[in-house]
Structure formats: structure tokens, C-alpha cells
Amino acid sequence: MIIDFHTHIFPEKLAARAVKNLGEQVHLTPHTDGTLACTEKLMQRAGVDDFVALNIAVSPKTEAHVNDFAIEINRKHHAFGSVHPDSPNALSELERLHDAGVKGIKFHNEYQNFFVDDEKAFPIYEKIERLGLVAVFHGGYDPGFPPPAKAAPERCARVCKLFPKATLIFAHLGGLSMPDDALTYLKNTSAMIDTAFMAGAYSPADAERVIKEFGAHRVLFGSDCPWEDPATTLSFLRKLHLSDDELQLILSRNAFKILT
């Protein structure tokens, strides 16, 4: 079984424009049109059995609509909602998502414009920890934004230490284009990482080094679809020097443990 833990889907009325604008911002060509139906077809072609749709509330005013969509998608696949630290309704939205059976929350600190260790987000992290929700963060740089990275591994490590009981996942092997920082600051925390956009941003040697040092039990397969084809990520992953047991942990067993 294969579960893609890192995908992005948009409501049909918004998908075409969203994918076009985002693609231009990060200088990438999307592999889907951003809709659920197109994503399902791509996953099927790649041999992926299920996936997690990660949604992002880029502003307080979009928060409720984003979470309505997440709840809808979550009825068929898995979807994570999102809250914005400047929203007066963030904590109640967490309760609503939890009560609706949504397992986790996605943050993208660049689009949401806050540093991951900003104290204004601490009540949200505390609530996530208390509710037993999962939190997924974009880790490291984003090609569409100038430095400094708002979720650099050093900052992410501070959050891990302050909220040790929370399940915190930092995408892009812990920090996009920052493998040494990911190992320096996150390796000895409870953080998990995913493989999103791994083939597009990492050499095989760096990817293998990060995965081996974190341990396969802390790594989730993710493609970052539509920005990377899951078939590409899978092919890249399978060429690394990983055992069958390590691959199974990464491809499904770790995800299954989190999602059930």
C-alpha cells in the first residue's frame, strides 16, 4: 500500500486559477489541474492507493471556507484543515475540525506570513497538542518567497521542544534545500519529516543521508502534487539504498499509524 501524505487540491471553481497563479509564483509546471478528479487519476497512474490533501488558510477570512472544503474531501480521502494565527476563530475552528473527524492541520508560514516559533501561534499549537491533532508545516525555504525562511529547522526545533507531545511533521525532508540544518536542529527532536518535492530539490546522496539519520520510522512519503508527480517521487525514493522494511514504513505504515 502507498499513501501520499502531501498533496494539494482546490475547489473546482478555484482550481484552475489557483494552480496557474501558484505555478507562476514558484516557477513550476503543475502535474494536475488542481481538482480532486484529476488528482485521483494521477495517483492511480502512479500506483498510489490513498492520499492526504493539505489545505492552507492564507488569511483569517479564508479559514472557514478552507476548512469546509477539507471536511468535504475528508469524507472520501484524507484532508487536513488549516487555521491562521491572526484569526479570532482559530481555536474554535480546531474544535470544529476535530469534531468532524479531520486528523490534522496544515501550516505554510510563508503564505500565512508568520515565523513558526512566533509566540502568537503557541495557543494554537497547545490546542492541537491537547486535541491530539497532527500539524504539518512547510519546512525550509520556498522558491516563491525571499529569505529568511519562516519555518527554518532551527525555529522548528524550538516548537518541538515547547510542545513535545504534539505530532509535528516538517515537509521537504525537514527543510527544503536545508538538509544540514534539518539534521543539526531536528534530528534529535520528536519531529517527523516527509519526502515532498524530494526529487526536485535534493541529490540522492543528501536525501538518503537525511532519511537514514532521521530513521525511516520518522519519514512519510509525500509528493507535493501537483508540483511533483508522485511517480517521480516514488522512482527517486526506490533508487535510494533503503531496505524493504524501511520503504514500507515510509510508503504507508507510518502514515497509517497517524491516520487511524
Image (cartoon, rainbow, N blue to C red):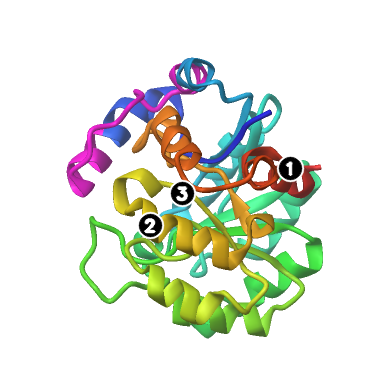
Label 2 sits on what residue type? Ala
Q: Where is residue 148 drawn, in percent x and y?
A: 28, 76
Label 3 sits on what residue type? Thr
Which quarter shows the C terminus?
Answer: top right
Callout 1: SS = helix
* Image position of 75 with respect to 249: above or below: above
Label 1 sits on what residue type? Arg
Q: Which mark is residue 253?
A: 1
First in residue order: circle 3 vs circle 2 = 3
Q: Which mark is residue 62?
A: 3
Q: Where is residue 159 drawn, in percent x and y?
A: 58, 79
Q: Label 3 to label 2, Cα distance in Å? A: 40 Å
Q: What residue is shown at x 38% (from left), y 57% (from top)?
A: 205
| Mark 2 crowd level (few <14, some 14–19, many ≥20, 10 Å Cα) | few
Please say if the residues under marks 2 and 1 sit with CB atoms less than 8 Å apart. Answer: no
Q: Which mark is residue 205?
A: 2
Q: What residue is shown at x 69% (from left), y 56% (from top)?
A: 217
Q: Where is residue 76 drawn, in percent x and y?
A: 68, 24
Closest to the camera, between mark 3 and mark 2, is 2
Callout 3: SS = helix
First in residue order: circle 1 vs circle 3 = 3
